[in-house]
Image: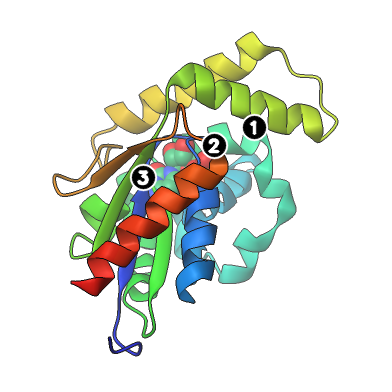
Amino acid sequence: MDTTQPFTVAIDGPAAAGKGTIARAVAEAFGFAHLDTGLLYRAVGAQMLAGQNPVEAARALSPEAFEDASLRTAEVAQAASKVAVIADVRAALLDFQRAFARRAGGAVLDGRDIGTVICPQAEVKLFVTASPDVRAQRRFDELTARGHAPMFEDVLADVKARDARDSDRATAPLKPADDAHVLDTSKLSVEDAVASAIAHVKATRAV
Ligand code: C5P
């Protein structure tokens, strides 16, 4: 195996399905670079909330802008899914993601359209999913652990609203690539979901 060659692991799926955890663990296990592409849309969403034009914000985005901890809020997540329907915003973020995907030494990208649009030639495509109730419960637990006091119904409504916006948009809608391996984490522990993803990457790498 030539470790200087590009090797892309594309991980797509809806909010709170476990993509981020799986992507970080796969990157760590194989020594690949990791990009959480949701942060790009969150950074643009945050700039829209601050009054900027989203297309201009996307064109001017620099990597430092998406390392900001304040991008993790529910308000920014909703704003991200609103700017993500704008075709010019997506186009402005394309080259950066494509270059990252094909960098030497391997890359893991998690998002909504990595296997379908950003890197259709990815060596491994995973579609990580879970039922809306399970995903809302995970988000609820996360928020509670961080000291917030959300209502479960509100968290579930948020998850469903984002699912609908991400799946129904015309440009790069959320859907599994035809050749994606679907991993439903509804009934899996974090450890089992990670182990299953790593086993899948290993099997593909060995071929
Ligand atoms: O993954 P995360 O929840 O951080 O993504 C925030 C929003 O950004 C998503 O709801 C989606 O609308 C958008 N997004 C996207 N394409 C990606 C990653 C995220 O449209 N590749």
Quick check: marks 2 and 3 in contact, CB under 8 Å?
Answer: no
Q: Quadrant of the C terminus?
A: bottom left
Rendered position, 149 above or below 34: above
Q: Residues within 10 Å of mark 2 (few under 14, many from 20)?
A: few
Q: Residues within 10 Å of mark 1 (few under 14, many from 20)?
A: some
Check disc 1 and report the residue beneath it.
74
Is 82 above or below relative to 60?
A: above
Q: Most extreme residue toward the right, as rendered?
A: 147
Q: Amino acid at mark 3?
A: Arg
The CA span between labels 1 and 2 is: 24 Å
Q: Counting other residues with Cα less than 10 Å from the Cα at mark 3, is it few (<14), some (14-19), or many (20 or more)?
A: many
Distance, label 3 to label 1, CA atoms, is: 18 Å
Q: Is residue 85 visible?
A: no
Q: Is residue 134 left or right of residue 122?
A: right
Residue at the disc numbered 3: 112
Q: Where, quadrant-wise, is the N terminus in this rendering?
A: bottom left
Which residue type does callout 1 highlight?
Ala
Report the residue marked by disc 2: 189
Dot 3 falls on a residue whose secondary structure is loop
Q: Position of residue 49 (x, y in %)?
A: 63, 40
Q: Residue furthest left?
A: 178
Above or below, 139 against 92 in this view is above
In the rendered image, is residue 187 in sight? yes
Closer-to-camera residue (60/40): 40
**Secondary structure beneath label 2:** loop
Q: Position of residue 172 (x, y in %)?
A: 26, 44
